[in-house]
Amino acid sequence: MSDIEPKTVQDMTAMVQTLLQQMQDKFQTMSDQIIGRIDEMSGRIDDLEKNIADLMTQAGVEEVEGEKVAK
């Protein structure tokens, strides 16, 4: 165990509450990072879709009802 061993039920309760709070904080931090990365990927995907549409327009290709048709 650790150097400090709980002497009473209150000490044990306080240690468990502290541990649970630390775990919750770590999970919240990880969750925030994951959501941030998903938002960043979403923005990149939107940029890629726009660039592809621009390239298709420049190449004279347009999408008609899900099929690509050359002009």
Image (spheres, helix red, strand yellow):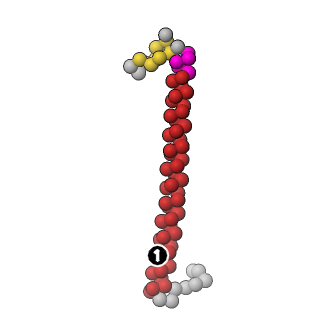
Residue at 52 percent across and 59 percent down: it is 29
Residue 24, relative to residue 14: is it above or below?
above
Q: Is residue 22 magenta?
A: no
Residue at 52 percent across and 69 percent down: it is 22
Magenta stretch: dominant secondary structure? helix
> Which segment is the magenta one?
55-59
Report the front residue among 40 and 1. Answer: 40
Which quadrant is home to the N terminus? Answer: bottom right
Residue 11, relative to residue 37: is it above or below?
below
Q: Secondary structure at mark 1?
A: helix
Outermost residue, top direction?
A: 71
Expressed as whole percent of the image width and height from the top left, the position of residue 31 reads 49, 55
Residue at 49 percent across and 50 percent down: it is 35
Expressed as whole percent of the image width and height from the top left, the position of residue 60 reads 52, 13
Residue at 51 percent across and 55 percent down: it is 32
Say what amino acid the circle numbered 1 marks.
Gln
Expressed as whole percent of the image width and height from the top left, the position of residue 61 reads 50, 15
Q: Is residue 57 magenta?
A: yes
For residue 67, which quarter of the picture?
Answer: top left
Total tally of numbered discs in the picture: 1
Residue at image mark 1: 17
